[in-house]
């Protein structure tokens, strides 16, 4: 995977809240699923490439970031060698794709979503959160949230060291944003009303697998995405990169996480899908390159 060193890095699509003091203490009520998964690592991955949290009553989300440092960093000659700048380019590419694909496939205007980069803890419209919940999308403010140190956990402790794991994580979260725009998430929440816990979890799995499929769809088109001047954002994307995305999906399946926690595998507690399901849905999106292949019914 190679990024275009000459591409414009649009840092206006991110909000850098690192060093802002974070706000909020601990999880502060941010609702995370997980059905009995225990341990710090498992808590982290309950949300990884799958975090989508409903609005609660905590409010929040009032703090703002100062992008001065990240903008200056990403204006340097070696910007694509910097972790935060590479992630901004991933975000630029994902949003460039959906800006065209959303009206084309869903007949709806794409609404840009800011990614908030934070450190340790953050306030959101879904409540206060800390790094322990992993990356997530909050529909209350239409923002993706990520502490970049999560990638260290993903690589060193969860067996997903490939670089393409990073854009896969972000593409999945933006898949949730597409579900919000198209009303698919609302339909799922409506279907959950009055359902049993296991039925609600099964519907959640459908939502998560669709987001995995959307991540695969973007991956297929990544090398065709451009900045505002028409310069390509990716110069290459190999089959090895795609395999790294598939490997990542396999490491964060519910069955794998339950085994890692030392608990018996219980399908009724699945909220994101098995390793095989997540891999298959990412692959399906990549093979088709068409968001319509990710269709599901709620």
Image (tube, rainbow, N blue to C red):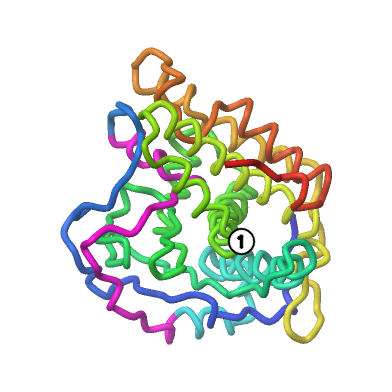
Q: What is the x, y in percent for residue 141?
A: 40, 70
Q: Residue at x 29, y 65 (%)?
A: 122
The front one of 129 and 89 is: 129
Q: Quadrant of residue 97?
A: bottom right
Residue positioned 40% across, 54% down in the render: 149
Quarter of the image where the C terminus is located:
top right
Q: Residues within 10 Å of mark 1 (few under 14, many from 20)?
A: some
- Tell me which segment is drawn in magenta: 40-69
- Percent from the top left, x then y, of residue 221? 80, 59
Residue at figure coordinates x 75%, y 79% from the top left? 6
Residue 143, percent across and down? 45, 67
Q: Position of residue 260 (x, y in %)?
A: 40, 22
Is 156 colored magenta in this rendering? no
**Which of 166/208 is in front?**
208
Residue 230's image quarter? bottom right
Whether 266 is drawn above or below 72: the answer is above
Dot 1 falls on a residue whose secondary structure is: helix
Q: Nearer the viewer, residue 143 or 185?
A: 185
Q: Looking at the picture, does residue 241 appear above or below residue 90?
A: above
Q: Where, quadrant-wise, is the N terminus in this rendering?
A: bottom right
Q: Is residue 281 above or below residue 74?
A: above
Q: Main secondary structure of the magenta part?
A: loop
Residue 68 forms part of the magenta stretch: yes
Taking the image as shown, residue 297 lies to the left or right of residue 3, namely: left
- Is residue 120 shown left or right of residue 4? left
Numbered-mark total: 1
Q: Residue furthest top?
A: 264
For label 1, the residue is: 182
**What residue is drawn where x is 64% and y is 80%?**
77
* Residue found farthest to the front: 194
């Amino acid at each position: 995977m190679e990024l275009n060193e000459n591409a414009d890095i649009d840092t206006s699509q991110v909000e850098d809240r690192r060093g802002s003091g974070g706000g909020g203490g601990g999880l502060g009520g941010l609702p995370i699923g997980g059905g009995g998964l225990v341990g710090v690592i498992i808590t982290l991955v309950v949300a990884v490439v799958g975090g989508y949290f409903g609005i609660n009553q905590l409010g929040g989300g009032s703090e703002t970031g100062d992008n001065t440092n990240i903008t200056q960093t990403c204006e340097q000659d070696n910007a694509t060698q910097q972790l935060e700048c590479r992630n901004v380019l991933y975000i630029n590419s994902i949003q460039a794709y959906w800006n065209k694909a959303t009206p084309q496939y869903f007949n709806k205007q794409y609404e840009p979503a800011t990614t908030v980069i934070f450190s340790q803890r953050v306030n959101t419209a879904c409540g206060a959160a800390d790094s322990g919940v992993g990356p997530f999308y909050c529909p209350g403010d239409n923002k993706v949230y990520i502490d970049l140190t999560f990638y260290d956990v993903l690589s060193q402790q969860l067996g997903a060291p490939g670089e393409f794991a990073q854009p896969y994580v972000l593409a999945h979260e933006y898949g949730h944003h597409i579900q919000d725009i198209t009303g698919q998430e609302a339909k799922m929440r409506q279907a959950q009303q009055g359902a049993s816990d296991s039925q609600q979890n099964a519907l959640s799995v459908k939502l998560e697998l669709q987001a995995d499929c959307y991540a695969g769809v973007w991956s297929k088109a990544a090398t065709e995405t451009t900045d505002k001047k028409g310069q390509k954002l990716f110069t290459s994307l190999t089959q090895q990169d795609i395999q790294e995305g598939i490997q990542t999906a396999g490491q964060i399946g519910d069955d794998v996480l339950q085994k890692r926690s030392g608990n018996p595998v219980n399908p009724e507690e699945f909220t994101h899908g098995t390793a095989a399901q997540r891999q298959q849905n990412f692959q399906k999106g990549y093979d088709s390159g068409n968001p319509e292949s990710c269709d599901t019914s709620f």
